[in-house]
Image (cartoon, rainbow, N blue to C red):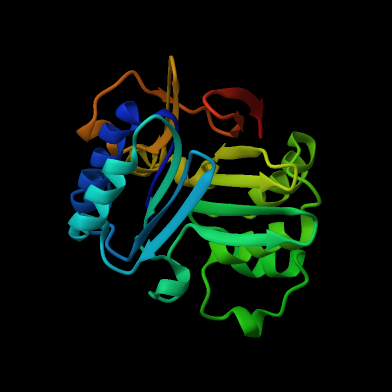
């Protein structure tokens, strides 16, 4: 499984979180204690929204080895920005650039979106829900199949519609359902939807809980949702997102609004 970062606000407050994700991807004590190695090295990517433009980057190299790319990204974190980052430790789907997140999809219903996910879902069940062909999707990850489901079934990224479909996929959770989706609607506005979910069986193990919890950081001019290991490299006043919680974030030119709901 993976390490994720979503943040919207001023870049000066986001840079320490980005630096923490890089360090957490190279040396993750929570992952190591679970006997799964200490690194997230199966590729990484990001989406940066800034000044009316979007940059989408993906690489098969580990994020902690991409010094030039990280320095470039750090330099772009000026003013008000929205950033989502994913560092992969593969669990489903082959290790290839195809399966590196964020995934980008365009819907026939008039919106585009980028998706990142940390955890394991029941891929076969989602294929059934989306009316897909399992043979065609043998090599793809569960997250790709989830994104395909959204592309086919979600009619509009309104809060009410999001809750219907994300609750449907929530039922396929095998371990974690920590997700971030950034939607761009044809009206020109952006919204983000974030979920924090841990299966009952998974969270019985304290090591799993420490590794899988999603942390939320809210302060003036910053909202962030990050994987647990970032707290080891950037101490802050995080809140552990309660299980089965979702956040609906409206993103404006230089501000944001957050609504917290039960998933």
Q: Which of 25 and 134 is in front in this view?
A: 25
Residue occupying image coordinates x 78% and y 62%: 108
Q: Height in image: 145 above or below 225?
A: below
Residue occupying image coordinates x 18% and y 49%: 27
Q: Quadrant of the C terminus?
A: top right
Q: Is residue 26 left or right of 198 when viewed as pictured? A: left
Mark yes or no: residue 118 visible.
Answer: no
Picture quarter containing residue 21? top left
Picture quarter containing residue 67? bottom left
Residue at the far bottom in the pictured view: 135
Q: Where is residue 66 in the image (x, y as percent from the top left)?
A: 22, 59
Q: Position of residue 89 (x, y in %)?
A: 34, 61
The number of numbered badges drawn on the structure is: 0
Q: Nearer the viewer, residue 88 or 19?
A: 19
Q: Where is residue 221 in the image (x, y as percent from the top left)?
A: 44, 19
Residue occupying image coordinates x 76% and y 38%: 158
Residue at the far top in the pictured view: 220
Q: Position of residue 143 (x, y in %)?
A: 55, 61
Q: Height in image: 62 above or below 221?
A: below
Picture quarter containing residue 76? top left
Q: In which quarter of the image is the N terminus?
A: bottom left
Mark yes or no: residue 189 visible.
Answer: yes
């Amino acid at each position: 499984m993976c390490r994720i970062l979503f943040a919207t606000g001023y870049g000066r407050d986001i840079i320490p979180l980005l630096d923490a994700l890089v360090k957490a991807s190279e040396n993750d004590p929570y992952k190591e204690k679970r006997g799964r190695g200490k690194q997230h090295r199966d590729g990484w990517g990001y989406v940066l929204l800034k000044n009316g433009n979007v940059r989408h980057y993906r690489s098969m190299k580990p994020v902690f080895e991409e010094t030039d790319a990280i320095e470039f990204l750090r330099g772009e974190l000026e003013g008000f920005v929205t950033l989502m980052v994913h560092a992969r430790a593969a669990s489903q789907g082959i290790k290839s650039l195809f399966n590196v997140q964020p995934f980008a999809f365009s819907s026939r219903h008039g919106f585009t979106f980028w998706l990142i996910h940390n955890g394991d879902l029941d891929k076969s069940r989602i294929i059934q829900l989306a009316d897909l062909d399992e043979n065609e999707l043998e090599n793809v990850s569960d997250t790709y199949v989830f994104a395909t489901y959204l592309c086919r079934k979600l009619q509009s990224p309104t809060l009410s519609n999001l809750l219907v479909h994300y609750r449907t996929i929530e039922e396929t959770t095998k371990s974690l359902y920590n997700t971030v989706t950034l939607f761009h609607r044809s009206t020109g506005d952006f919204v983000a939807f974030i979920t924090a979910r841990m299966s009952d069986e998974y969270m019985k193990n304290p090591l799993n809980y420490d590794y899988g919890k999603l942390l939320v950081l809210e302060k003036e001019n910053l909202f962030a949702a990050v994987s647990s290991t970032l707290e080891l490299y950037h101490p802050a006043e995080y809140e552990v997102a309660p299980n089965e919680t979702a956040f609906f974030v409206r993103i404006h030119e230089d501000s944001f609004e957050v609504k917290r709901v039960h998933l």
